[in-house]
């Protein structure tokens, strides 16, 4: 009898509101070690707020977020710093520092978080550039000299620079053409497999979701309304999931339109 991997991220009864707007309304979710979970859902459904709660950037009103069984809600100081060492993050817009060359962008946390020497950080940066298919000569360039696809690769190299146990991907293919998006998807899969990391992604891009996920969860109005293996998604028997993955205007999901 096979046993499941342990739960890496466990979320229980998570609530978050901003004033009268309820954004997370009792989220329950598990991500197991080594798993790639992609959260899908429309704009305003709570995806980004959920990610920020896990990272400790937003404090939930109530509920539990456990990483490796350790409660993180309310964690501060050295314990929070220790916990953050487990994470890597690929931000939606890349979020590279314009004033730093590529290698310093990749090595920023190594220098300022792990106190590695600049030579050590540069060597690791070049190694991670190679992992995302970029050559050493890119290391000295500034972000402004890179194409959108190259910027995304550099951002991915930075996300994996510290060999994190958990990597978050926030809309990893936003702003890319379909071919470059597929290149990034392939790199995400490759890096995850090589590192053995647990990954949690949020995206609107269903081609990306199908490529990088082994499990899919859909969030709607602050609740997880379906979760299953990626190959089960097309036969979910959930009308919300079916409408979303096929991009249909007609269905139970309606877009809020401000009236003049």
Image: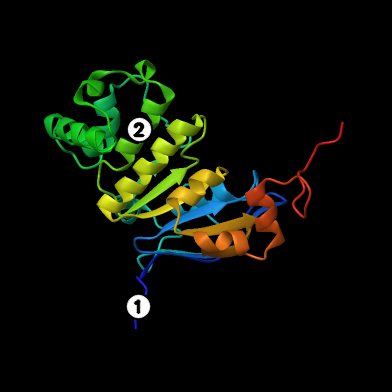
> Can I make out residue 163 in this image?
yes
Upstream in the sequence, badge 2 or badge 1?
1
* Location of mark 1 (residue): 3
Query: Crowding at label 2, few (<14), some or many (≥20) Cα neighbours within 10 Å?
Result: many
Are dots 2 and 1 in contact, CB under 8 Å?
Answer: no
Rendered residue at 20%/25% (across/down): 136
- Is 41 placed above or below 183 here? below
Say which of 195 and 25 sits in front: 195
- Is 125 placed above or below 20 here? above
> Can I make out residue 56 in this image?
no
At numbered mark 2, what does the secondary structure look like: helix, strand or loop?
helix
At numbered mark 1, what does the secondary structure look like: helix, strand or loop?
loop
Say which of 203 and 122 sits in front: 203
Say which of 47 and 84 sits in front: 47
* Location of mark 2 (residue): 153
Quadrant in the picture for the N terminus: bottom left
**Residue 47, position as x, y percentages in the image:** 57, 50
Say which of 95 and 242 sits in front: 242
């Amino acid at each position: 009898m096979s046993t499941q991997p342990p739960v890496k991220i466990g979320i229980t009864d998570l609530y978050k509101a901003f004033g009268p707007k309820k954004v997370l309304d009792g989220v329950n979710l598990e991500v197991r070690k080594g798993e790639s979970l992609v959260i899908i859902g429309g704009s305003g459904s709570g995806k980004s707020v959920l990610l920020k709660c896990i990272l400790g950037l937003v404090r939930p009103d109530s509920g539990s977020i456990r990483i490796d069984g350790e409660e993180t809600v309310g964690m501060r100081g050295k314990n929070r710093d220790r916990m953050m060492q487990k994470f890597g993050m690929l931000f939606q817009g890349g979020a590279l520092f314009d004033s730093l060359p590529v290698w310093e962008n990749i090595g920023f946390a190594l220098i300022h978080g792990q106190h590695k020497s600049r030579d050590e950080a540069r060597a690791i940066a070049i190694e991670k550039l190679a992992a995302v298919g970029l050559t050493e000569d890119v290391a000295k360039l500034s972000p402004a000299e890179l194409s959108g696809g190259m910027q995304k690769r550099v951002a991915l190299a930075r996300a994996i620079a510290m060999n994190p146990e958990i990597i978050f991907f926030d809309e990893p293919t936003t702003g890319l053409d379909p071919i470059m998006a597929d290149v990034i998807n392939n790199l995400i899969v490759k890096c995850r497999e090589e590192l053995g990391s647990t990954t949690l992604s949020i995206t609107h891009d269903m081609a990306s979701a199908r490529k990088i996920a082994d499990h899919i969860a859909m969030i709607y109005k602050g609740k997880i309304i379906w979760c299953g293996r990626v190959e089960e998604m097309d036969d979910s028997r959930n009308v919300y999931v079916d409408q979303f993955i096929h991009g249909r205007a007609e269905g139970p999901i309606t877009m809020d339109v401000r009236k003049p």
